[in-house]
Structures are given as structure tokens and as C-alpha cells.
Image (spheres, rainbow, N blue to C red):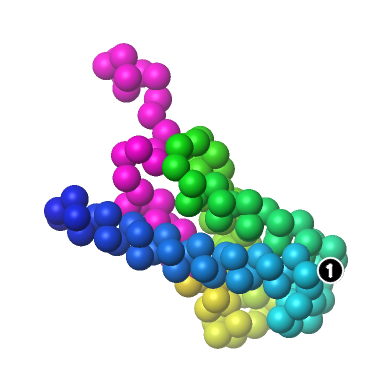
Amino acid sequence: MSDKKIRAIYWIATIWLALGMTAGGVQQLFQTGGYVDIVKHLEYPVYILSILGAWKILGVIAILIPGYPLVKEWAYAGFFFAMFGAATSHFIIGDSITEAVPSLVLLILTLISWIFRPADRKVVSINSKLGTS
């Protein structure tokens, strides 16, 4: 696959991921958009929304700004665990797959963005810099 196609896949997935996480993060932070009902339905405390919302917004900033590859890794990990946890929570309480679709879409976008991220957005180990294994 050409470098141009890889970058296009990365940016398309990352922009959609950023939009989804920002929209959800703002709604969670301010506890609007039906999130209170969802969290109560999943039997989580409502205050978790403020925590998740703030971290999602910070995660979007982390993956979009240049540099800080280690912070980006943490942001991707946070997105992965939050979306995997959300989808799993719906399945555990017996919700249909349609309830988990938003979480699953964001989970897939997280994986695509992470897999196709450019080299300058990846953590490089000191061993690879030294040419050792």
C-alpha cells in the first residue's frame, strides 16, 4: 500500500474518531444527550460521565497535536478500553448489538487510527534507535 493511501486512511479514521470522541466527551462532561439514562441503565454512577468526558476531550487533543508519541499511546489505550468497556457493558446486561454500535464504531476507528498512524506518531524504543533487539 502506498504511503499516500496509508496517510489518507489514518487521517480519515482519526478525524472521524476525533469528532466522535469530542461529541461524546462534551455531552458526557455536561451530562446531556441521553448519557445519564444510558449510564443509569448500565448501572454505573452518573459522576463517571464527567470523568470519561474530560478524558475523551484530553485524548482527542493528545492524538491530534504533533509530537508526544507516548501520550498518544496512552490516549489510544484509553479510547480502546473505554469503547471496549462500553460495548461489553451493553452485552453483559443483555442489550442488543444496536445499543453497542456507537461504541463498536469508535473502537474500530481507534484501531484503524492506531494501526495506520505515521512513524512520527509512534513510540520508538531505545533498542530500535540503537539497532539492538
Give above or below for 64 relative to 44: above
Q: Is residue 42 visible?
A: no
CA neighbours of label 1 inside 10 A, class few (<14), some (14 to 19), many (20+) = some
- Indicate the amino acid at tag 1: Val
Residue closest to the eye, 23 or 38: 23
Q: Quadrant of the C terminus?
A: top left
Q: Inspect the magenta stretch and tell me whether residue 79 lies in it.
A: no
Magenta part of the protein: which range?
A: 106-133
Residue 37 image position (x, y, % from top left): 78, 81
Which quadrant holds residue 26? bottom right
Q: Inspect the magenta stretch and tell me whether residue 127 lies in it.
A: yes
Residue 99 image position (x, y, % from top left): 60, 82
Give above or below for 124 relative to 83: above
Residue drawn at the location 63% of the way across and 57% of the way down:
57
Q: Main secondary structure of the magenta part?
A: helix
Q: How many marks?
A: 1
Residue drawn at the location 52% of the way across and 68% of the way down:
19
Residue drawn at the location 35% of the way across and 59% of the way down:
11
Residue drawn at the location 44% of the way across and 42% of the way down:
66
- Which residue ends up furthest to the front in the rendered image? 66
Which quadrant holds residue 89? bottom right
Residue 70 image position (x, y, % from top left): 51, 35
- Side of 131 relative to 92 (left or right): left
- Return the residue at label 1: 46
Tag 1's secondary structure? loop
